[in-house]
Amino acid sequence: MSKHVITVDPIQPASNAQAYSFINHGAVYILENPKAQRVKVGTTMNDVADRLKSINGKWLGFDATCQICGGRRRINNRGFVPKHAVSGRACPGGDTLPLERDAALAESHLENLKKSHSELSGSEKGSATRIINKLEKRIELYRNHDQPVGMWQISTVFYTESAGEVEERSHQILAEHLDTQALFGEVFSCSVSKATKAVETALSQLGLLHTSKKEIKNYETSEKYGECAICGGNVTITGPCPACIRRFRI
C-alpha cells in the first residue's frame, strides 16, 4: 500500500493541506460509474473535480460532437451544436443535432467527400483521405452508441511523480478489460478494486508506491458509522450524510 492514505468526504473537496501538499505531483484518478459498471483510469495535473465535471458533461450529452468537424461543443437549449467556426470558416455542422443523436448530416458530408476525393492530388488528397477516415470512424462509433447511463464519481486518487507513466502502465495491466465502445478513452469494464490494484502495481513497478499519496472517496454508509442528526439515516465513515448534503447543499 502507499504510505499516505487519506479518506475524504466525497461531496466536499479535500482540505487545502491535502489538495496542495502534492502540488508538484500529477494525479492518477479512478472514476466509477456504478450504474454503468465501468471505471475510468486517467491522469491530470489539475483539480480532479474539474476533470470529473468535464467527463460527466460529455457522458450526459451536455458536451456533444459536431457531425462535420468532430469538435466537442456545449449544446444549446434546443439540443443543437451551436454555430462555430473551423480555421476561420463557419462549420456546416453548427445549429444541427450532434452526432450522438443523429448521423444523417455526417453521412451526407462523407458521401460528398468521397465523390470529390478522386479529383484531388498530392498533399490535398492525403489530407482529404485522413478527414474521410476520421469521419468514418466517428460515424461508426456513434452508430453503435448506446445512451449512457448513470454518472461518474471520484473513487480513488493517487498523487505521485511520473503520473503519466503510472497511468500508461495501469492501462496496460487493464488492457483486457478496455471498453472499446465507450464514448471516450480510458474506460474499463472492471471493479474499482481491480483498477486500484492495477495502479498500485504500476506504482510498485516504478518504485513510487511508498512515496505516493492515496486519497479514497468513501461513499459507503453504514450503521456502524452513526446516525444522521437531520434525517436519521446512516452516515459515511467521515461523518456526513450524503443524502442530506445533496438535499440541503451543506
Image: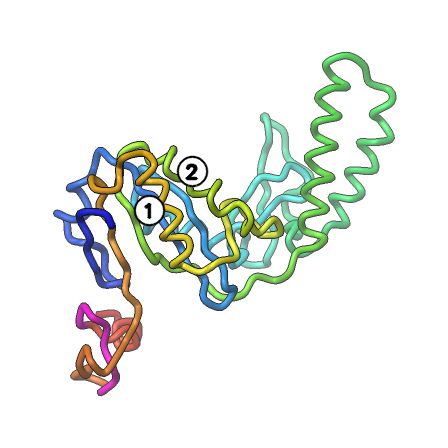
Amino acid marked by disc 2: Arg
Q: Which of 158 and 23 is in front in this view?
A: 158
Residue at point 53%, 45% (across, down)? 175
Residue at point 31%, 40% (across, down)? 204
Q: Is residue 208 above or below residue 124?
A: below
Q: What secondary structure is the magenta-colored segment mainly?
A: loop
Q: Is residue 78 above or below residue 136?
A: below
Amino acid marked by disc 1: Glu
Specify the label residue 200 is tagged with. Answer: 1
Specify the label residue 218 is tagged with. Answer: none
Q: Position of residue 233 (x, y in %)?
A: 25, 84
Quarter of the C terminus within the rendering: bottom left
Label 1, residues with CA under 10 Å away: few <14, some 14-19, many ≥20? many
Q: Name the residue under label 2.
A: 169
Magenta-highlighted residues: 232-239
Q: Which of 147 and 37 is in front in this view?
A: 37
Q: Residue furthest bottom?
A: 232
Q: Which of 178 and 126 is in front in this view?
A: 178
Which structural element holds mark 1? helix
